[in-house]
Amino acid sequence: MVQTTIETMLRQKIGLDASSIGSNAIAYAIEQRQSRCGLPNLKDYYDRLQHSPEEFDALIETVVVPETWFFRDREPFIYLKEWSKTAWNPNCTLRVLSAPCSTGEEPYSIAITLLESGLAADQFRIDALDISQVALEKAKQAIYTKRSFRGGAINPAYFEETGDRYQVRSHIRKTVQFVQENLLESHRLLEHQYNVIFCRNLLIYLDQEARSRVIKTLDQALIPPGLLFVGSAETSQILHDHYQSVDHSAAFAYRKAEPRPSQPAPSKVSAIKPVSKPTISLPRLEQAKQLLDRGQFAEAAQLCEAHLLLDRTDANAYLLLGKIYQELNRPEQAEKAFQKAIYLNSQFYEALIELALLKEQQGDLATATILKARLQRILKL
Ligand SMILES: C[S@@+](CC[C@H](N)C(=O)[O-])C[C@H]1O[C@@H](n2cnc3c(N)ncnc32)[C@H](O)[C@@H]1O
């Protein structure tokens, strides 16, 4: 009972959907904080929480998931580099937001990408925000272990080796400004406008209302036709009526549509060169993804099924098909597709999330809990 009330407090403050990390994880965080406060009784800890904003912040620090690494998912950065080289007008300052940035690996990866795309450090500005003060302190120090690279190359041009640690070199550090902010309460954000926003791997932890609020805030901050990058499991959250998926597989990036001619166009639009339509024919699966994004679900399903006739071992295709079936309101077929994706790749994080959410919607909380426990194990790995 008391735990449920604390979960509600967390939901209201940071939008956390307790089921996304599991009640056990929250119970564990509360236990840790209780013992740090020397309060053996949960009710006493709850009283402390209510009267001490500092303790509430400390609890938030304990429940948030700071998992991140350099060049996470790779493709978004490959796409950003290409976009910056071909679509951005370098005479304008490119403004980028990384929210949430956690311990800094994401905004520094963006900085390296932009420098490699040919922009000079004074041709772009990166703002990076997170609710976690602990994560931000680490981000500012910019000292990392090998774990932050997940086996990726560590380029000495960008990182200085000191023992078993690597510090981001100062010319890259200088391009990122870190600020502590709760995205659910964020007002400072709206004072700025951005050409590119990275909001990855936060929405999956939020409840529906919080997701909508965050997406609305980011939408107001993004100048069309700027880019919004989300996490691989978060693409279904995008406002598909005025965002279009970019033509780059696994970038999970969306271009914000220009306002209709009757609306006044924002002054910075000219900074982006007009986008030409792709002339090459896209692989079937990519076409299916675009059709899904455009809301042409039946056609998307047809293409995806055709692709699977040729390759029955493509777990990504089953995941996509599952998402399409969900849009078509065919939950049983969606479930089968997600299960096949997981059968083909037992560690398939996104498919496990989709299946867990589906089971939850169907009221099958027992299966959803088992799936979430599996997701937790994968996260720990
Ligand atoms: C999994 S990390 C994502 C980091 C990075 N974007 C990535 O994809 O690697 C999630 C981060 O969200 C932050 N966070 C959670 N709720 C937040 C909120 N309401 N406002 C701002 N940051 C929040 C956490 O502190 C954590 O650092």
Image (tube, rainbow, N blue to C red):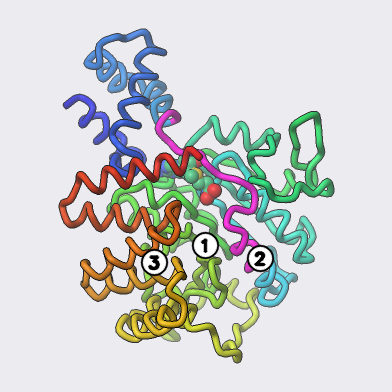
**Residue 42, image quadrant:** top left
Looking at the image, is mark 2 or mark 3 earlier in the sequence? 2
Q: How busy is the neighbourhood of tag 1: few (under 14 within 10 Å), some, or many (20 plus)?
A: many
Q: Position of residue 198 (x, y in %)?
A: 54, 57
- Residue 253 highlighted magenta (yes or no): no
Disc 1 to disc 2, C-alpha distance: 12 Å
The amino acid type of the residue labelled 3 equals Leu
Tag in front: 3 or 1: 3
Residue in the picture at 44% in, 62% down: 220
Spot the residue most to the right. 157
Quarter of the image with the N terminus in it: top left
Residue 182 in view of the camera: no
Q: Are marks 1 and 2 in contact (CB under 8 Å)?
A: no
Residue in the picture at 76% in, 59% down: 115
> Horizontal placement of 44 versus 264: left or right?
left
SS for callout 3:
helix
- Residue 69 highlighted magenta (yes or no): yes
Which labelled disc corresponds to residue 229? 1
Circle 2 sits on which residue?
78
The amino acid type of the residue labelled 1 equals Phe
Residue in the picture at 77% in, 56% down: 121
SS for callout 1:
strand
Disc 3 to disc 1, C-alpha distance: 19 Å
**Residue 210 higher or lower than 137, as above or below:** below
**Residue 211, image quadrant:** bottom left
Residue 123 in view of the camera: yes
> Horizontal placement of 134 versus 1: left or right?
right
Circle 3 sits on which residue?
319
Residue in the picture at 40% in, 32% down: 63
